[in-house]
Image: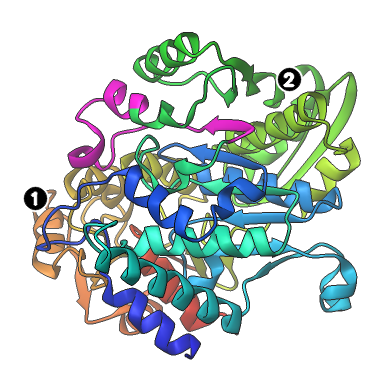
């Protein structure tokens, strides 16, 4: 069967959070039954599991790049994807097995033919389990992809897999692994209908990736999150690594941090101390908020080195950080396009912080769309005033468009959010039309900002970046 057929069949399973389909009840017993029928591939490689609301993808990408730079056969599993589903499943291979031009141990997407082969193996296995009454229904989109990724990583004999949790933690399909290290990034309100109505409740779900006597890497954050995570760690006798010591400090990096603060869309550049030695951080990921994610990745790498026996040198950490690729996160595409996947209020605040430091006189146009289960009202309050043509920015524009997703917010809902703030807005039928219209509306030297959903950013990016 072909890759196209595999992807078509996969999408036919439906997204877990899509509506009006019935709300899916998550149960790790189902994922464990599927994995067992496939030979329990998740038991054949060591893993780091990363949960959180914001920053977990950036942290995972940075840590995987560090491990690859250390010469480890590394796997990376992330979600969702920008353009291709194969982006979610990557491995770093020895130099002789990849294009020499790409460099040794570069993270590569799973080949399409391998994706198709493993997808239909997972699907056939699942169908047999359903027919035999061992599964109540076919696995979901994410469960199928996770099983496929675990099979691929096991076949590649990876030395370490960096796994980004999809939703929550406790009941997420990735949580059938037994992680060497669990990482929890910043937690905010999102997916409340599944994870809980408060920061404390959501944090408890995220803390479900902890194991008795395991290792946790995290940072101090919202007090309710700290209390929930700390309580779970104490109950499980978990060793906690505080990544705060790897944030840039004025004692070492004052001048470099000040320089970066003046140009937030430039790479993060500063120095820290790691095991008594200076470590030069040169990350292509822009935005001050990324320093927290970089610190988490460094702390996890140090934990792998000091507690788990991995040979990860400071040079590998520096090189891995510098080589990190994580598109669509404050990504500037010359001459006029800034992409950011800010998909919830916390992400919108991080984007606002970056935009607010740009030259005030520079005109800007916002292309925005989001999913209907997101907090559109709050995101509008955070972002739309920065583009308000009626409030001192006459050359600015806001442009709404539809995204190709069953959970997409309607144009009418988007317009209603702008009208509530008395901010004018235009509309376009799709992302390609939106980009064309934005470029016609934006004065020379202006900036176009596309944000609100990873699905919008992926579509806009695909329109301007060579495949």
Image location of residue 18, percent across then percent down: 20, 61
> Is residue 231 visible to the viewer in this orientation of the structure?
yes
Q: Is residue 286 visible?
A: no
Circle 1 SS class: loop
* Vertical position of residue 283 compared to residue 424: above or below: above
Residue at x-position 63% and y-position 78%: 111
Earlier sequence position, callout 2 versus callout 1 = 2
Image quadrant occupied by the C terminus: bottom right
Residue at x 38%, y 59% (from the top left corner): 142
Question: In percent of the image, x 40 and y 37: which residue is there?
Answer: 169
Q: Which quadrant would residue 291 be assigned to in this image?
A: top right
Q: Nearest the camera: 354 or 146?
A: 146
In the foreground, 444 or 24? 24
What residue is rendered at 88% in x and 27% in y? 278
Q: Does the magenta stretch include residue 41?
A: no
Q: How crowded is mark 1: few (under 14 residues within 10 Å), some or many (20 or more)?
A: few
Q: Where is residue 344 in the image (x, y as percent from the top left)?
A: 32, 46
Residue picked out by circle 1? 420
In the picture of the structure, the residue carrying the numbered disc 2 is 250
Residue lying furthest front in this view? 132
Front-most of 354 and 138?
138
Q: In this view, does 403 lie to the left or right of 32?
A: left
- Residue 453 in picture, x, y percent from top left: 34, 60
Report the Cα–Cα distance between label 2 and label 1. Answer: 43 Å
**Magenta segment:** 179-204
The answer to whether 256 is drawn above or below residue 398 in the figure is above
């Amino acid at each position: 069967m072909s890759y196209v057929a595999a992807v078509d069949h996969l999408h036919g399973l439906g997204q877990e959070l899509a509506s009006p389909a019935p709300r899916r009840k998550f149960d790790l017993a189902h994922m464990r039954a599927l994995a067992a029928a496939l030979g329990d591939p998740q038991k054949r490689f060591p893993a780091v599991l990363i949960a959180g609301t914001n920053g977990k993808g950036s942290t995972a990408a940075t840590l995987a790049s560090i491990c690859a730079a250390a010469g480890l056969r590394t796997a990376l599993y992330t979600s969702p994807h920008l353009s291709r589903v194969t982006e979610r499943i990557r491995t770093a291979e020895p130099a002789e097995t990849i294009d020499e031009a790409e460099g040794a141990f570069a993270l590569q997407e799973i080949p399409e033919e391998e994706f198709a082969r493993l997808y239909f193996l997972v699907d056939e296995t699942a169908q047999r389990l359903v027919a035999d009454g061992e599964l109540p229904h076919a696995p979901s989109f994410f469960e199928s992809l996770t099983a496929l990724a675990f099979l691929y990583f096991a076949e590649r004999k990876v030395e370490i897999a960096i796994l980004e949790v999809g939703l929550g933690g406790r009941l997420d399909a990735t949580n059938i692994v037994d992680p060497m290290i669990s990482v929890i990034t910043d937690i905010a309100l999102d997916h409340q209908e599944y994870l809980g109505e408060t920061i404390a409740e959501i944090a408890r779900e995220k803390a479900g990736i902890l194991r008795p006597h395991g290792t946790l890497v995290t940072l101090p954050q919202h007090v309710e999150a700290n209390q929930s995570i700390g309580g779970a760690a104490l109950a499980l006798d978990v060793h906690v690594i505080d990544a705060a010591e790897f944030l840039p400090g004025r004692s070492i990096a004052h001048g470099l941090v000040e320089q970066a603060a003046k140009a937030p869309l430039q790479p993060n550049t500063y120095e820290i101390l790691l095991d008594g030695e200076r470590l030069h951080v040169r990350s292509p990921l822009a935005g001050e908020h990324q320093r927290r994610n970089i610190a988490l990745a460094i702390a996890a790498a140090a934990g792998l080195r000091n507690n788990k026996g991995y040979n990860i040198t400071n040079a590998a950490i520096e090189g891995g950080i510098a080589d990190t690729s994580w598109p669509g996160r404050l990504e500037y595409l010359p001459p006029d396009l800034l992409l950011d996947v800010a998909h919830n209020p916390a992400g919108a605040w991080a984007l606002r912080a970056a935009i607010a430091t740009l030259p005030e006189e520079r005109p800007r146009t916002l292309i925005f769309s989001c999913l209907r289960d997101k907090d559109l009202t709050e995101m509008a309050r955070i972002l739309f005033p920065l583009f308000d043509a009626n409030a001192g920015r006459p050359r600015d524009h806001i442009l709404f468009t539809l995204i190709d997703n069953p959970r997409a917010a309607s144009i009418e809902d988007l317009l209603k959010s702008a009208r509530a703030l008395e901010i004018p807005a235009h509309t376009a039928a799709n992302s390609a039309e939106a980009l064309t219209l934005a470029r016609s509306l934006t004065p020379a030297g202006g900036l176009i900002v596309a944000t609100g959903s990873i699905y919008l950013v992926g579509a806009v990016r695909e329109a301007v970046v060579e495949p």
